[in-house]
Image (cartoon, grey):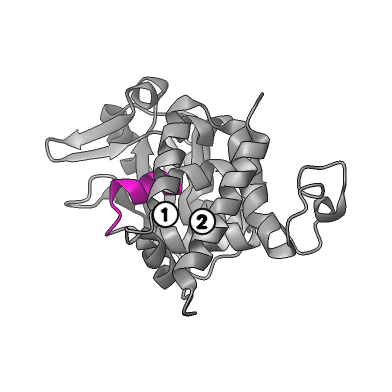
């Protein structure tokens, strides 16, 4: 799939990639997710993890004609309505697990190592330039972390994750009928194979710090006394009487994939 961004956005990302400092960066967030799975929602910005120290980002981005948002320190605006949320993500910051913009603004960088370690180059639409795009499995982990960090503000992440669980595995994917593959040999119903496949892919890349986050996400979604399953059902417009239980069943299939894919 091509990247679901405009040619104006593609041009600005190409300009960033050609900056004289040659910054290393990876596309994450909804635009990156939409490269892997068609989303129900559109996004008006792009999310970038940039291997540049926080005190060097301003000089780099202003040289492109981008301006920082007055109050949201990680948000930048460029020509033709371009908007990007840019997080500095050097190896030291990723090891620390967060980046601080000021006394009152801190953002988690847990899982950003996965975004860089499991990325592929994708052509920017309307250009001859390429951009690194995080893998589907790494974005799943990042969206779980984002939701756990701000569950009442980040319901769109639940919508995205519901879409991924449902549609990550194409209806004509040969692995569904391949008895030599964990999906084909799972014995699962057709609709259960997709969340199972997402679990397989996440299990293949996550390590202990990520596992703790995924386990916390799963625990909250499966908690019948909590509200997380209902929140995902609402976000995904599941209006059946058993919507909460349908969500929990999908999450159990995701967990089954993790358990099947866990290294022995």
1 and 2 marks in contact (CB < 8 Å): no
Q: Position of residue 131 (x, y in %)?
A: 58, 43
Q: Is residue 150 magenta?
A: yes
Residue 66 vertical placement versus 166 (above, below): above
In terms of sequence position, does the residue under pointer 1 or pointer 2 come before the other?
2
Residue drawn 39% across and 31% down?
89
Q: Is residue 184 magenta?
A: no
Residue 152 visible: yes
Image: magenta residue range: 143-152
Callout 1: helix, strand or loop? helix
SS at mark 2 in the image: helix
Taking the spot 87% from the left edge, 41% from the top edge, the residue there is 180
Which percent across, then down, holds residue 156?
Answer: 40, 62
Horizontal side, residue 67 vs residue 158: left or right: left
For label 1, the crowd category at 10 Å Cα-Cα, with few meaning under 14, some 14 to 19 and many 20 or more, is: many
Give the CA separation, mark 1 to mark 2: 25 Å
Asked whether 214 or 49 is in front, the reply is: 214
Quarter of image, res 35: bottom right
Indicate which label's residue lies in the foreground, 1 or 2. Answer: 1
Q: What's the mark number on residue 31?
A: 2
Seen at 13% across and 40% down, the residue is: 104
In the picture, measured across the screen, residue 107 lies left or right of residue 223, that is left
Left or right side of 255 for 77? left
Q: Which mark is residue 75?
A: none
Quadrant of the image containing the C terminus = top right
Instruction: Where is residue 241? Give x, y as percent.
Output: 46, 79
Q: Quadrant of the N terminus?
A: bottom right
Viewer-closest of 222 and 178: 222
The relative height of residue 194 versus residue 89 in the rendered view (above or below) is: below
Magenta residues: mostly which secondary structure? helix
In this rendering, would 108 be left or right of 190?
left
Question: Residue at label 1?
Answer: 221
């Amino acid at each position: 799939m091509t990247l679901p961004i405009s040619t104006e956005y593609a041009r600005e990302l190409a300009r960033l990639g050609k900056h004289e400092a040659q910054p290393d960066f990876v596309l994450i967030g909804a635009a990156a997710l939409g490269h892997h799975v068609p989303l129900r929602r559109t996004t008006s910005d792009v999310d970038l993890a940039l291997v540049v120290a926080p005190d060097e980002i301003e000089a780099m981005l202003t040289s492109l004609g981008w301006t920082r948002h007055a109050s949201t320190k990680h948000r930048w605006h460029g020509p033709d309505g371009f908007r990007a949320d840019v997080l500095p993500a050097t190896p030291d910051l990723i090891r620390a697990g967060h980046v601080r913009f000021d006394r009152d603004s801190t953002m988690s960088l847990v899982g950003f190592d996965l975004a860089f370690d499991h990325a592929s180059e994708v052509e920017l639409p309307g250009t001859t330039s390429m951009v690194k795009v995080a893998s589907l499995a790494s974005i799943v982990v990042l969206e779980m972390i984002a939701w756990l960090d701000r569950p009442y503000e980040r319901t769109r992440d639940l919508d995205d994750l519901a879409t991924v669980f449902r549609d990550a595995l194409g209806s004509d994917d040969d692995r569904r009928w391949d008895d030599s593959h964990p999906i084909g040999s799972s014995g699962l119903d057709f609709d259960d194979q997709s969340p199972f496949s997402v679990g397989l892919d996440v299990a293949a890349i996550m390590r202990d710090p990520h596992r703790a986050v995924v386990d916390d996400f799963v625990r909250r979604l499966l908690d019948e006394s909590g509200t997380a399953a209902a929140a995902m059902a609402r976000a995904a417009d599941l209006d059946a009487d058993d919507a909460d239980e349908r969500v929990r069943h999908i999450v159990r299939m995701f967990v089954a994939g993790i358990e099947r894919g866990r290294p022995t």
